[in-house]
Image (cartoon, coloured by chain):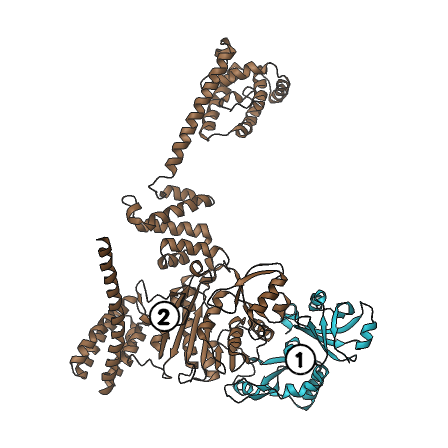
Chain colours: A brown, B cyan
């Protein structure tokens, strides 16, 4: 017994790995056993399989030793005896060797007959073998964990994961693997695997790793390729650099840069597309509290907010409306571009934000502004229709482009929110269009911008405006952005929507943004390029399923060929019949609208249908032409490729 | 929004006169390029919700169709009436005052920040000072690089300033641009 206790103590001192269970010095007592595990874990430097086996053997030996037994010593005396055992060092060596030489099966007494040296050498050999074996095992284990064929986790594994806290490094590895497989799915996928499985697993992993809700991840996956999606999400995790805008009413960029450099601010010109922007890397003084800031020499503004004002390009002595002006960064930029001439109406709906708007305007020395507090939708009644030259509408949006500034957007936005914003934005853009005077000498432009990358808030709103009013999309002058989507999944937008511009954090290093510039062609409330029946048709279909829109588009493509060759009334009735088909397939409220169409077309005069058909056919021809051009371009590309290969 | 009546106009002009003196004429008759017409109009004062605004006439005309409840600000706000009925100039009038100021004071860089925190100007922080300042005059405070920082009332005449010890107050603080950060709600 004494030998056993000594062994325990000696073992703590020695550096031999605890390969044997004999580490338990005091026989069987539970107190002693409780001391064992901590000791073992301290010394443990090898995979966990051994301890499992070791503890099993511990118990075996325990039983053995208990059988061999001591003479009814209690736990108290065991401690005591342990203490005694630890005091005596001398006899420990032989026992150490004995214990060290024992393998999983060895017993105490059998080895005592052999010589010390042989025992030692055997022990060393066995140690070496074990280490080699472990090393080999590790090697193979590692290889197995990262095979060329990545396997999706099974349901059981997923359930096990869901129980515990998310294992972040594991998730990250899995995300990378899935992205790698999906990026070249044909070559890299294991047999029988479906793309949707991988995509679903990726969605779930991204949600838990980055903290997004499912809706947002779902829409982002639909919009971007997998590799680009990863870049976008990574870009959202970091903040964009701080940028400032020189107030040209009071100073010049060069002078401001000099002054700020003297104060210890590290800055650079923003980009080649801006003459007033400066980017701040770091600064010794708070950049929002320098005397220059307070004197109104510059404004803290993110780079993406320069863009809509640059697209608007207000001229001197114009009348401009900013429909959602707070906190006033864009309004003051407009005033600076207009050099304090003309009139700016700065409107802001929310009262708490008015103070910051007024303060910024005064601080920057803007004198040509009237600040009012209306709902943007009422502005056309207050200011009068067709009364101003330009309108800037930086619409309230879901903020999905500025996730790097506000992380709560990741989890708080749902499909409902997006739809509500889209509805509000559609109303606002119509109000904005009504404010503008199409016959103005210098203007007639509306700029619509949001800090969101969602399609229902951007391209869909522009498409709605195109259908409802007589406006045209014009290039905004920001060539370095990505063009807007003219079609997405099952939705089809007017081809001119491609002239709008999108900006992304991972491409342009600014917040996600969307800018569109519209020109008002005439003050009429109806778009001239489409006739009334077709327009009301489209109205009926605005809320319909997108399949119907496609079907209608195809129908109308066919119509010109029909309409031109036949007298108008006959073709009218044919269209009338075609339209009748639609109400049957639609819901009741759409049926009601179609009854109004019927009455309209029935009472229409002979001349109008002719003009309307021509205009409708023109519009449809435009779309058809655009599509053909694209198809031709595709064919040319396809031809070029085989030529290169040959 | 309404034009100022007699008493109100006199009060406002008196306050302005302290700071700008005879340049008051310039302020009132300043040609403005605002408004879409090519001929410059002139400026005028208007009262809205106890605040006095300095706006050009063209702007005033356009603002008439905005109802009183919803009109927040026009042109430049130069000051406001307190409940007691006295008129105070606010920091937002600094641009007009600075352009036409009669009495100016320049601060050393070291004491700029102190003034921006709302403290009075001490003799030790004074860089330059214009002559012929009488106690009670309005003074506009600049930094050495001619950036207007605020305004106040002179406590001592120019000659007395030279005799003062470094901790003596030269200009009593009334308004400074630091208020844009400190007192945003008050504006």
Residue contact between numbered discs 1 and 2, judged by CB atoms under 8 Å: no
| Residue A424 visible in this rendered orientation of the protein | no
Crowding near the residue tagged with mark 1, few <14, some 14–19, many ≥20 C-alpha atoms within 10 Å: many
The one nearer the camera, A209 or B121, is B121
Residue B26 placement, left or right of A538 = right
Instruction: Tell me the residue that label 1 is attached to.
Output: B97
The one nearer the camera, A636 or A326, is A636
x and y, in percent, of residue A80 in the image: 64, 20
Q: Residue furthest top?
A: A113
Q: Chain of mark 1?
A: B
x and y, in percent, of residue A539 in the image: 32, 75
SS at badge 1: helix
Seen in the picture, residue A522 relative to A275 is either above or below; the reply is: below
Q: What residue is shown at x 51% (from left), y 18% (from top)?
A: A100
Q: Residue furthest left?
A: A566
Instruction: Tell me the residue that label 2 is attached to.
Output: A499
Q: CA distance from mark 1 to mark 2?
A: 47 Å
Q: Which mark is residue A552?
A: none
x and y, in percent, of residue A112 in the image: 51, 10
């Amino acid at each position: 017994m004494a030998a056993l206790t000594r062994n325990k103590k000696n073992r703590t001192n020695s550096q031999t790995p605890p390969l044997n269970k004999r580490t338990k010095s005091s026989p069987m007592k539970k107190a002693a056993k409780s001391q064992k595990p901590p000791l073992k874990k301290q010394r443990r430097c090898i995979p966990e399989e051994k301890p499992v086996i070791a503890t099993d053997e511990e118990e075996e030996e325990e039983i053995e030793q208990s059988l061999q037994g001591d003479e009814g010593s209690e736990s108290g005396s065991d401690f005591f005896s342990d203490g005694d055992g630890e005091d005596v060092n001398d006899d420990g060596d032989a026992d150490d060797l004995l214990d060290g030489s024992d393998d999983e099966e060895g017993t105490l007494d059998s080895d005592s007959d052999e010589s010390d040296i042989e025992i030692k050498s055997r022990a060393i050999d066995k140690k070496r073998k074990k280490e080699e074996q472990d090393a080999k095992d590790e090697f193979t284990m590692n290889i197995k964990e990262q095979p060329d064929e990545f396997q999706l986790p099974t349901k059981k594994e997923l359930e096990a994961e869901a129980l515990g806290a998310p294992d972040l490094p594991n998730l990250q590895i899995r995300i990378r693997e899935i992205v790698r497989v999906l990026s070249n799915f044909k070559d890299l996928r294991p047999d029988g695997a479906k793309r949707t499985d991988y995509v679903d697993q990726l969605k779930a992993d991204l949600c838990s790793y980055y903290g997004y809700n499912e809706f947002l991840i779902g829409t982002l996956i639909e919009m971007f390729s997998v590799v680009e999606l990863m870049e976008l999400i990574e870009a959202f995790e970091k903040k964009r650099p701080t940028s400032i805008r020189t107030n040209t009413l009071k100073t010049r960029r060069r002078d401001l840069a000099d002054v700020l450099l003297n104060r210890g601010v590290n800055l650079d010109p923003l980009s080649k597309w801006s003459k007033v922007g400066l980017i701040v890397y770091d600064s010794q003084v708070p950049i929002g509290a320098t005397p220059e800031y307070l004197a109104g020499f510059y404004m803290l503004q993110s780079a993406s907010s320069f863009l809509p004002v640059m697209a608007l390009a207000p001229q001197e002595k114009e009348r401009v409306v900013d429909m959602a002006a707070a906190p006033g960064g864009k309004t003051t930029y407009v005033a600076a571009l207009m050099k304090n001439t003309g009139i700016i109406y700065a409107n802001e709906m929310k009262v708490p934000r008015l103070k910051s708007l007024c303060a910024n305007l005064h601080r920057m020395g803007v004198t040509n502004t009237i600040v009012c507090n209306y709902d943007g939708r009422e502005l056309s009644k207050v200011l009068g229709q067709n009364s101003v030259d330009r309108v800037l509408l930086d619409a309230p949006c879901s903020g999905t482009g500025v996730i790097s500034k506000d992380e709560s957007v990741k989890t708080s936005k749902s499909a409902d929110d997006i739809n509500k914003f889209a509805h509000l934005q559609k109303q606002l853009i119509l109000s904005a269009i009504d404010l503008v005077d199409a016959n103005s000498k210098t203007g007639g432009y509306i700029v619509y911008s949001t800090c969101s990358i969602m399609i229902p808030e951007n391209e869909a709103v522009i498409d709605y405006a195109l259908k409802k009013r007589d406006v045209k999309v014009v290039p905004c002058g920001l060539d370095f952005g990505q063009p807007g989507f003219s079609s997405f999944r099952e939705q089809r937008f007017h081809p001119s929507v491609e002239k709008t511009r999108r900006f992304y954090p991972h491409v342009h290093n600014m917040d996600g943004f969307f800018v569109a510039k519209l020109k008002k062609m005439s003050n009429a409330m109806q778009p001239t390029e489409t006739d009334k029946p077709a327009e009301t048709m489209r109205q009926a279909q605005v809320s319909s399923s997108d399949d119907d829109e496609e079907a209608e588009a195809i129908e109308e493509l066919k119509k010109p060929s029909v309409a031109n060759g036949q007298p108008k009334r006959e073709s009218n009735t044919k269209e009338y019949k075609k339209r009748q088909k639609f109400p049957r397939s639609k819901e009741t409220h759409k049926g009601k609208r179609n009854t109004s169409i019927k009455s309209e077309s029935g009472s229409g005069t002979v001349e109008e249908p002719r003009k309307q058909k021509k205009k409708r056919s023109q519009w449809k021809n435009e779309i058809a032409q655009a599509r053909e051009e694209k198809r031709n371009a595709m064919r040319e590309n396809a031809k070029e490729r085989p030529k290169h290969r040959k | 929004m309404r034009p100022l009546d007699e008493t109100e106009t006199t009060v406002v002009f008196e306050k302005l006169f302290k700071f700008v003196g005879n340049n008051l004429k310039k302020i009132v008759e300043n040609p403005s390029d605002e408004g879409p017409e090519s001929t410059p109009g002139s400026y005028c004062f208007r009262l809205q919700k106890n605040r006095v605004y300095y706006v050009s006439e063209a702007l005033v005309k356009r603002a008439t169709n905005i109802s009183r409840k919803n009109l927040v600000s026009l042109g430049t706000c130069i000051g406001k009436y307190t409940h007691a009925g006295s008129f105070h100039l606010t920091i937002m009038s600094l641009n007009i005052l600075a352009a036409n100021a009669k009495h100016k004071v320049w601060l050393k860089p070291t004491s700029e920040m102190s003034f921006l925190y709302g403290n009075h100007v001490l003799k030790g922080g004074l860089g330059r000072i214009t002559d012929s300042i009488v106690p009670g005059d309005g003074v506009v405070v600049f930094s050495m690089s001619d950036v207007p920082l605020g305004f106040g009332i002179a406590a001592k005449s120019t000659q007395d300033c030279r005799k003062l010890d470094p901790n003596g107050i030269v200009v009593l603080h009334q308004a400074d641009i630091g208020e844009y950060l400190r007192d945003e709600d008050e504006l």
